[in-house]
């Protein structure tokens, strides 16, 4: 039996359960924190919200997800998550090479500023 790997982030942490042909992670997002606005050129992702509420921006769309909601983010789709509460997100994706993260700044709005990483 393998153990998960925890990677600390400014916004919380990601718990990597497996990263082979496919990748499965638990993203633990702190309230009022967010990841950077980014995209993956080859990684296709599905996010299922296990607990909490989050704000999501992808391309030019803003939505709110609650426990039990899910969202597919195809490759080449800019996105970020913001914790409206403490949240746990199940991420199922193609392999996470660790080098397929393309970040960009976004304009501030009522939820997000450019300080997140």
Image: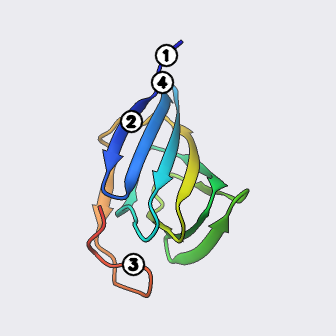
Question: Relative to 73, is 14 on the left or the right?
Answer: left
Q: Nearer the viewer, residue 101 or 51?
A: 51
**Mark with earlier residue (1, 3):** 1
Which residue is denoted by mark 4 in the rendering? 20
Mark 1 to mark 4: distance in Å? 13 Å
**Mark with earlier residue (2, 3):** 2
Which residue is painted at 56% across and 52% down in the image?
Answer: 88
User: Crowding near pointer 3: few (<14 within 10 Å), some, many (20+)?
Assistant: many
**Dots 1 and 4: beta carbons under 8 Å?**
no
Residue 52, above or below 50:
below
Secondary structure under the numbered disc 2 in the rendered image? strand
Residue 59 drawn at (x, y percent): 49, 71
Secondary structure under the numbered disc 1 in the rendered image? loop
Question: Relative to 9, is 2 on the left or the right?
Answer: right
Secondary structure under the numbered disc 3 in the rendered image? loop
Q: Nearer the viewer, mark 1 or mark 3?
A: 1
Which residue is denoted by mark 1 in the rendering? 2
Residue lying furthest bottom = 110
Quarter-wise, where is residue 22 in the image? Answer: top right
Residue 79 drawn at (x, y percent): 46, 64
Which residue is denoted by mark 2 in the rendering? 6
Question: Relative to 114, is 65 on the left or the right?
Answer: right
Quadrant that contains the C terminus: bottom left
For residue 112, which numbered disc appears in the image? 3
Mark 1 to mark 2: distance in Å? 13 Å
Residue 2 drawn at (x, y percent): 49, 16
Quarter-wise, where is residue 96 in the image? Answer: top left
Q: Nearer the viewer, residue 7 or 63?
A: 7
User: Crowding near pointer 1: few (<14 within 10 Å), some, many (20+)?
Assistant: few
Residue lying furthest top = 1
């Amino acid at each position: 039996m393998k153990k998960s790997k925890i990677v600390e982030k400014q916004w919380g942490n990601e718990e990597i359960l497996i990263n082979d042909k496919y990748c499965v992670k638990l993203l633990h997002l702190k309230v009022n924190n967010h990841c950077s606005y980014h995209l993956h050129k080859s990684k296709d992702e599905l996010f299922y919200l296990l607990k909490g509420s989050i704000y999501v921006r992808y391309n030019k769309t803003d939505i709110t997800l609650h426990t039990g909601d899910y969202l597919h983010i195809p490759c080449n789709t800019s996105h970020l998550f913001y914790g409206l509460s403490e949240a746990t997100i199940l991420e199922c994706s193609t392999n996470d090479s660790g080098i397929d993260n393309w970040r960009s700044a976004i304009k501030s709005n009522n939820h997000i500023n450019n300080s997140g990483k």
